[in-house]
Amino acid sequence: MTCPGTGIRRPYPPVSPFLAGSLQVFDITAPGINNHAVRAYSKELTGVLIQLLKCKIHQACVTDADLSYEGSLGIDAELMDLIGLRTYEKILVGNMSTGDRFETYAIREAPGSRRIVLNGATARLGARGDRVIIMAFGWHREADLRGATPEPRVIRLDEENNIVAASGFEGSPEPLSYSAE
């Protein structure tokens, strides 16, 4: 692939297989290279990336902690599916009881179990009964947003991890209320 307006060939493969075709690396230090054209072309391919909240489980109650497990945060599969959280997706967790914040990844607990389980090292950052906020973020090209910010899917839970409110779901611009039945 030749970078338009520069006459040079891209000497390196894409930086990441996840960004293949969108982020390219060029040698802009070579003599006679039009650095402005390379930068403009690179910006056209990638744009400005911005990280926005994708989904959140608010006030989940920790049901268990397992220090001997390899790591992660176990979350009821029904809750994960509802908000669009994927297995092994990176999450940021804020413990409302201790003030600790930590990053880990999500794994599925039995559907309908309402379990929120601190596993591995995260078991030292909370205890049964602690209330936590679980957040996942997604990258967006700023140009693709066109002034509109996508609303994250958010659910609020009670002390038994039943949904008491939700927002950000298609067709429901106002927060919805759910009964814990």
Image (spheres, rainbow, N blue to C red):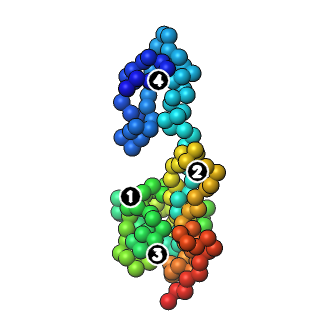
The amino acid type found where label 2 is placed reads Leu
SS state under label 1: loop
SS state under label 3: loop
What residue is pinned by disc 2? 145
Horizontal and vertical percent position of residue 123: 45, 64
- Mark nearer the viewer, 4 or 1: 4
Whether residue 135 is situated above or below residue 7 in the rendered picture: below
User: Which quadrant is the N terminus positioned in?
Assistant: top left
The 10 Å Cα crowd at callout 4, few under 14, some 14 to 19, many 20 or more, is: few
> Circles 4 and 1: CB distance less than 8 Å?
no
- For the point 35% across and 75% down, the residue is 110
Q: Is residue 173 left or right of residue 103?
A: right
Q: Nearer the viewer, residue 181 or 148?
A: 148
The answer for how far apart the CA atoms under marks 1 and 2 are is: 26 Å
Q: Residue 4: give its label.
A: 4
The answer for how far apart the CA atoms under marks 2 and 3 are is: 38 Å
Q: Quadrant of residue 24?
A: top left
Q: Nearer the viewer, residue 141 or 110?
A: 141
What residue is pinned by disc 3? 63
- Mark nearer the viewer, 4 or 3: 4
Label count reads: 4
> Of callouts 3 and 1, which one flags the residue occurring earlier in the amino acid sequence?
3
The amino acid type found where label 3 is placed reads Thr
The answer for how far apart the CA atoms under marks 4 and 1 are is: 39 Å
Whether residue 82 is situated above or below residue 178 in the rendered picture: above
